[in-house]
Image (cartoon, rainbow, N blue to C red):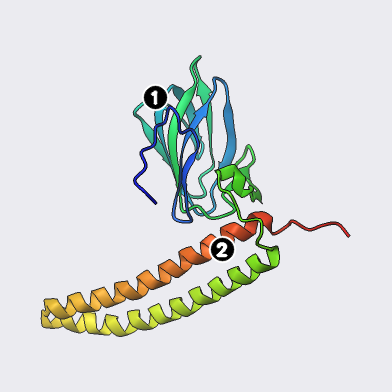
Amino acid sequence: MGFTVYDYRTDVRNVLVTPEIRSRFLRMEPGQAAGRHSHDLGHEIFLILEGQCEFEIDGETQILSPGQMCIALAHQPHSVRVIGDEPMTMYLSVTPHIHPTHTGRTEDGGRLPPAFAPSSAYDVEQDMNKSIEELIDHHVDEAQAVAQAAQAAADVQRDMAAKLKTAIADGDKQAATDARNAMWEALYTMFQGVYNCADGWNELAPRATEIESA
């Protein structure tokens, strides 16, 4: 990915969509509202650039103006409504971005069935030449790879934890550093596997129910 500069006045869209994070500029018109929902895994950050809007997050309401930001944590029901006569533009990011990305909420905060939006809803072009069967098999392979990486990482954590304790007791900073770094390398491999699995899941989930009637 090259060094691209984005401008909220022209790039009103999703500008980065990965399992780790989705970020975008969003413009809403006067009176427009986004209904109450939450994210099963993602924390969402909102930064107002132009206009004003009213946020409701976990039952509390605040009005935000340009230069102000707020955060809706995972599972916190939230909604937004533009107030005043001017459009509102914001920057937002959700991390991680793993389907289902939105779970609707009732007026009293109850969970509605999760919404698996199509990739196009996030300005992502999906390779439709891949069959659903291929996506399923790929996802299962990635999930199995995660399980193997997690077990390997757990083994390293156990072995290096003993060495780390000994190094701390002996006051051996180099040995402690080596043990910590080994622990991280194993975790790094595991997390990369998790993101690969999430990437495959994000391809599969929106299409999983594309079933032709018999």
Q: Whole-percent x and y of residue 164?
A: 22, 80
Q: Residue at x 37, y 42 (%)?
A: 4
Please give the residue where the numbered disc 1 appears in the rendered image: 65
Of the residues shown, which amino acid type is indicated by label 2? Gly
Of residues 125 and 152, the one drawn nearer to the viewer in this rendering? 125
Q: Residue furthest left?
A: 171
Of the residues shown, which amino acid type is indicated by label 1? Ser
Q: Residues within 10 Å of mark 2 (few under 14, many from 20)?
A: many
Q: Whole-percent x and y of residue 197?
A: 52, 66
Q: Is residue 166 above or below residue 190?
A: below
Q: Is residue 133 above or below residue 106?
A: below
SS at mark 2 in the image? helix
Q: Which mark is residue 90?
A: none
Q: Is residue 64 above or below residue 25?
A: above
Give the position of the C terminus as an image quadrant: bottom right
User: Real-space Cα distance between discs 1 and 2?
Assistant: 38 Å
Left or right of residue 46, residue 39 in this image: right
Please give the residue where the numbered disc 2 appears in the rendered image: 200
Q: Residue at x 63, y 60 (%)?
A: 204
Task: Mark 1 or mark 2: name the one nearer the start of the chain.
Answer: 1
Of residues 67 and 117, the one drawn nearer to the viewer in this rendering? 117
Q: Nearer the viewer, mark 1 or mark 2?
A: 2
Q: Residues within 10 Å of mark 1 (few under 14, many from 20)?
A: some
Q: Whole-percent x and y of residue 6?
A: 39, 36
SS at mark 1 in the image? loop
Q: Residue furthest top?
A: 85
Of residues 91 and 135, the one drawn nearer to the viewer in this rendering? 135
Q: Residue at x 47, y 24 (%)?
A: 88
Q: Whole-percent x and y of residue 187?
A: 36, 72
